Image: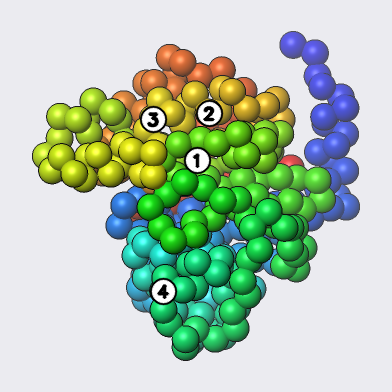
Amino acid sequence: MPLDCSRSCVVIYRKLYCSIMKFASIGSGSKGNCTVISNNSTSLLVDCGFSLKQTTARLERLNMNPQDIDAVLVTHEHDDHWSGVRALCMKYEIPIYLSAGTYRAVNDRCLGPINLVDTEVPFTIGGFKILGITVPHDALEPLQYVFETNSLRFGLLTDLGHLTPYIFEHYSCLDALFLEANHDELMLAEGMYPSFLKARISGNWGHLSNSQAIDFVNKIDHARLQHLVFGHISDRNNCRSVLKKLVNQTSGILGKVHYANYEYGSDWIEII
């Protein structure tokens, strides 16, 4: 196969002269979620659903500590995303970014520096340009985020029940994507959850199934996608082997596929 010389030159140039974006999950699942995004100058967390002790230990696995974090961006108020934010940010005086609706939902006036995110209006933190994306989920004003630095684009997309044209628009042409694949439809239907909870999870304001997630990736422009990470994988209504089999059968993804879990999260993934 001939070498893509233009791509090789771009990679070498970025490594020598530009910030390289990298990201990692310190844990992803129904019991807790937290993602780290970093470049040469700025390190951010998205959500923190772990205790302060757990968060510190999980960051240490990535050779980081809480003092390295420049800001925490919150997607919504559910405990698996929010429960550790207050303790972390109060102790280390880390600014918090969240929607006005999420701020009202947490109903906590002792949070330290607060920055309200105006959805659909880009903002900057250090070396990152960030856009908050409105998503359909059963929270007061949930957001997901797209990050950009030196023309590299990373999208985080979890906790949504269906996919809107606005989401398709802003999650095309990414270099990396962290995407929810919460449940296998058959496992959820035949599982032990009560009917109302099954309806909530599979409904338009719940969570994406494996097939919805893979269909989304195949429909967006993923020509430049280097890495795809599936996360928020249910430990009761899904399993990695089922998801991986479906990915191998149906996906036309050209980039490398990873799977984040609750216990370990993922290793650092570098975007160049």
Q: Is residue 177 visible?
A: yes
Q: Which residue is mark 3?
A: 210
Give the residue displayed 48% in from the left and 67% down from the top: 102
Q: Amino acid at mark 2?
A: Phe
Q: Is residue 233 visible?
A: no
Q: Position of residue 254 (x, y in %)?
A: 62, 23
x%, y% of residue 3?
81, 19
| Residue at the image point whose x is 73% and y is 63% from the top | 123
- Which of marks 4 and 2 precedes in the sequence? 4
From the image, tell me which residue sits under label 4.
Answer: 106
Indicate how the structure is coloured in the image.
Answer: rainbow
- Mark 4 to mark 3: distance in Å? 30 Å
Q: Earlier in the sequence, mark 2 or mark 3?
A: 3
Numbered tag placed on residue 179 in the rendering: 1
Bin the neighbour count of mark 4 within 10 Å (Cα to Cα): few under 14, some 14-19, many 20 and up.
Answer: some
Label pair 2/3, CB-CB below 8 angstroms: no
Disc 1 or 4, which lies upstream in sequence? 4
Q: Using residue 152 as the reference point, say whether residue 197 is left or right of it.
A: left
Which residue bears the numbered disc 2?
A: 216
Q: 10 Å neighbourhood of mark 2: few (<14), some, or many (≥20)?
A: some
Residue at far top of view: 1
- Identified at 54% across, 86% down, the residue is 112
Rendered residue at 88%/52% (across/down):
17
Q: Are marks 2 and 1 in contact (CB under 8 Å)?
A: yes
What residue type is disc 4 on? Val
Tell me if label 1 and label 4 are in contact, CB under 8 Å: no
The quadrant of the picture occupied by the N terminus is top right
Q: Amino acid at mark 3?
A: Asn
* Vertical placement of residue 115 versus 186, above or below: below
Marks 1 & 3, CB-CB < 8 Å contact: no
User: In whole angstroms, how far apart are the C-alphas of marks 2 and 1?
Assistant: 10 Å
